[in-house]
Amino acid sequence: MATLILVRHGRSTANTSGVLAGRTPGVALDERGPRRPPPSRAPRGRPARRGRHQPLQRCRETLRPLLEARPDLPLHVEDRINECDYGDWSGRKLAELGDEPLMQVVQNHASAAAFPGGESMRAMQNRAVEAVRDWNARVEAEHGEDATYLMCSHGDIVKAIVADALGMHLDLFQRVHVDPCSVTAIRYTRLRPFLLRLGDTGDFAGFAPREHPGGSGAAEVGGGAGAP
């Protein structure tokens, strides 16, 4: 089956200001966001056959350098890989959200977490994985089982897809971390998926200790701003 390259959008103004943007419109990349364009070549030197992104501005801006380099690349909008609908949490500071009782559920029991006025994390994962399964079949039918395609999405979406590929329960998905503009690659086969890359930025600065809202060991809801 196909190989999927998952790109998390570049660093946004919301990431920099510590805001959980969610689906808030008009959130653009910050001054560093466009510096690291997504790859135009697939693993083993094979060109990507198709690109998919969700409709928010920061994903469109992330893909712009790729489309300039590959104007032949068909691009599709896929709503099922849209950002998690954080509902009433959208637009709020992550430092404030750390005091919400629901944050402990999000951190430790994600499969039971549902955002007020939004969606559950379980529903988020289900729709994203369904989109990947559908596009795997479509890309393979059109281009063969060695084809590669790209999806540009958000931190929690990428983590949820990776958890599914690894056979991890959603309650463990906060153990996965992907920085802005990082590349994750999954090769799907008849028997199982293979995780080829996870959150690869090519930048060792990401290994340095960081301050996290909510204290040491807390996962950054929405994905965080990446290395300083």
Image (cartoon, helix red, strand yellow):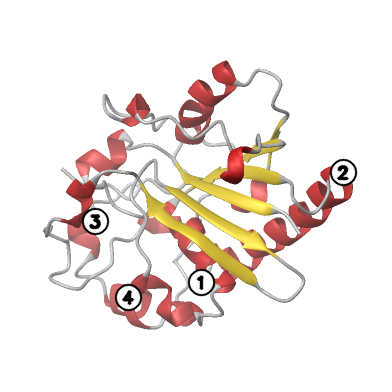
Which residue matches tag 2?
Answer: 142
Q: Please say whether residue 50 is visible from this viewpoint.
A: yes
Q: CA distance from mark 3 to mark 2?
A: 43 Å
Q: CA distance from mark 4 to mark 1?
A: 15 Å
Which residue matches tag 1?
Answer: 163
| Kind of residue at disc 4 | Gln
| Residue 217 versus residue 24 in the image, above or below | below
Mark 4: secondary structure = helix
The residue shown at (45%, 76%) is 113
Is there CB contact under 8 Å for labels 3 and 4? no
| Kind of residue at disc 2 | Glu
The residue shown at (11%, 59%) is 211
Q: Nearer the viewer, residue 217 or 2?
A: 2
Tell me which label, 2 or 1, sits earlier in the chain. Answer: 2
- Write down the quadrant of residue 119 in the picture: bottom right
Mark 3: secondary structure = helix
Which residue matches tag 3?
Answer: 94
Which residue matches tag 4?
Answer: 107
| Residue 184 versus residue 60 in the image, above or below | below
Tell me which label, 3 or 1, sits earlier in the chain. Answer: 3
| Kind of residue at disc 3 | Leu
Mark 1: secondary structure = helix
| Residue 225 versus residue 103 in the image, above or below | above
* Foreground disc of the pair 3, 1: 1
